[in-house]
Image (tube, coloured by chain):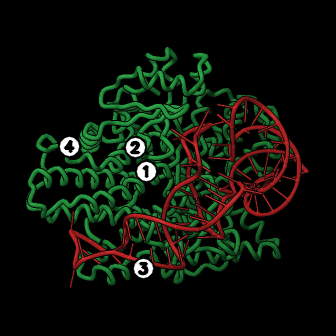
Amino acid sequence: MTTTQPLHGLDAFALPIRQAVCAALDVNLDLISLERPRQEELGEFALPCFRFAKQAQMSPPALTAKLADELSIDNVTCEAVGPFLNFRIGAKALAQAIVTSAQSSTYAGGDEGLTTLVEFSSPNIAKPMHVGHMRTTVIGAALSRIFSHLGHDVKRINHLGDWGSQFGKLVAAWQRWGSEEELNATPIEHLLELYVRYHKEEKEDETLAADSKKSFQELESGEENKTRATWRKFTDISLAEFNKVYARFGIEFDYLRGESWYEDQLNDMITWLDECGVTELSDGATIVNLEEQGIKTPSLVKTAHGTTLYATRDLAAAKSRWEEFSFDQSLYVVGAEQTLHFQQLKAVLSRCGVEWEQRMEHIPFGLIRLTEGKLSTREGRVIALSDVLDRSVELAAKSIEEKNPELPNKELVAEQIGLGAIVFHDLKHQRQKDVVFDWKEVLSFEGDTGPYLQYTHARCCSILRRADKDVPSINDIDFSILEGGRELWVAIGRLPQATREAAIKREPMLIANALLKIAAAGNGFYRDNQVLGTGDDNLESARLVAIDTLRKTLALGMRLLGVPAPQEM
RNA sequence: GCGCCCGUAGCUCAACUGGAUAGAGCACCUGACUACGGAUCAGGAGGUUGGGGGUUCGAAUCCUCCCGGGCGCACCA
């Protein structure tokens, strides 16, 4: 993936350094990858020289000493420390380059121009969204924004779970025990209650299983019958509930397409699989054997009684998306427990000989567990997502009453802080790892949290608000005044790389970490550098620009993650 | 049983994917001119990176074997 984008932040210094080393050593530029020194005091970049030393048949320290002596790079000094070569950027050049770069609205962005599909959230109709849906929703939305900032044409797809035999159960349950009254009062709760009851009684009463199977067959028949009308009603009710949650998270989808959207492509899918010659019958069911692909479990595409399955619908969806979008990458932000499913999906397509299967990628994440055990809708071990949001917002409101009771727009800000805390908490962990849901930790507003970033941002806004003048142009300030802010400039300067890596590794946490560093450095900066009331106009001008740069960078990063940035809190 | 993921300070997590003395936050101690906002800042204490073996200049990271936890493994999604 090559880009022609201008170099942002510290990248503007990294390239000349690498080129200089490249010229001195006569090795491929790609082999020279700069690292971060162990300690900040050592400089901004480090290059371990073990490999190059071997090649040059010198001892590492001898080589670094020689290089340190020979290299001459504008605004960069170079020091040999044993086998490491450390580079330090001149204070004024650093401040000037980073501030100028970070003032741009396209900071840390790009023009990669790829078409990227992101499927995420995908809750099941007729069930409440619980904390288990939070990760896919929050991670998927963040990845979408990150790719978008890097210049991708992003298609956000909500693959609603609105099809399948479970809806046979639900409709059958509704026909037996449904209450119009309760449905109006507490729609999702009532539907869930029906589903759970059916699931339970099905084990004892065989007629129930037959009924639900029949209902699903009616649903899949394609006819406009009563079953379908009921299903549609449930879908509409559920969507209205989901949209409330998405609105709070500030998330919009480009395509709200449930599994049912691919309904009329399912038969074609089976036909296509037949034509590709990959299907076979096994115990009456239609399967695709994947043993040659190293997967022991075959993919089941049609049951013995003729209905389709999850795999059938995902295959149809994948093919349909390829035909519609010709995507460069198609990402599925779905829990790690479905790893096998996506391996099968890709393996089936691979057996069919399609090249684009390689552009599909499962982005797994660890599941959320409760201290009491796994989340389970059926067993009643759930925490509704809206409950988590409400409690967080409530706590934020309480905090505002204690700290800043005069704050205007208290409700709105409480919502922003409450949501920000939850979103950031989710995104600051590595995707893959399971997280144990702990109220105390999720609702924490101190330390490395969303509110910490929000607080830092608000304080910047506060300083800018209190200033007598607008933020000066970067052309009118003396950058030598900002030389003391090295830590801050370095932290801000690393955001572009963090963003790029977040995209490559599909790991928003890297941005979360970079933001925490920026906020920490920012707090140090305005502690040590009085902005207002010094009586020195040049000083004030330069520092106002510094604060404004900090504010903008935080706002940018928070926007990418989906953490709101109120001006006051 | 087979496959995938995980194991780092009391707790929750980092460590630039093989680099320098393993870093943060919470909790616990000590401090911060009536504060450009204390949701903050400065400092202290806290580690045999689950265990053994191997690979090499160098391992939390790679290989291997154990131990512990999680998730999957054909008519659910």
Question: Does the rendering let one see residue A4?
Answer: yes
Q: Position of residue A318 (x, y in %)?
A: 58, 40
Q: Earlier in the sequence, mark 4 or mark 2?
A: 4
Question: Does the rendering let one see residue A188?
Answer: no
Distance from disc 4 to disc 2, alpha carbons, whole Å, reads: 21 Å
- Which residue has dot 4 on it? A480
The residue nearer to you, when weighing A118 against A553, is A553
Tell me, for residue A175, which label it has, or none: none
Tell me which amino acid carries mark 1.
Answer: Ala
Q: Earlier in the sequence, mark 4 or mark 1?
A: 4
Instruction: For mark 2, give the secondary structure.
Output: loop
Mark 4 near mark 3, Cβ–Cβ under 8 Å?
Answer: no
Instruction: For mark 4, give the secondary structure.
Output: helix
Farthest residue in the top direction? A26
Q: Against B38, is A347 above or below? A: above
**Protein chain holding label 3:** A
Distance from disc 4 to disc 3, alpha carbons, whole Å, reads: 43 Å
Q: Earlier in the sequence, mark 3 or mark 1?
A: 3
Tell me which amino acid carries mark 2.
Answer: Arg
Find residue A349 and report its image quarter: top right
- Which residue has dot 3 on it? A395
Instruction: For mark 3, give the secondary structure.
Output: helix
- Which residue has dot 2 on it? A494
Q: Against A291, is A382 above or below? A: below
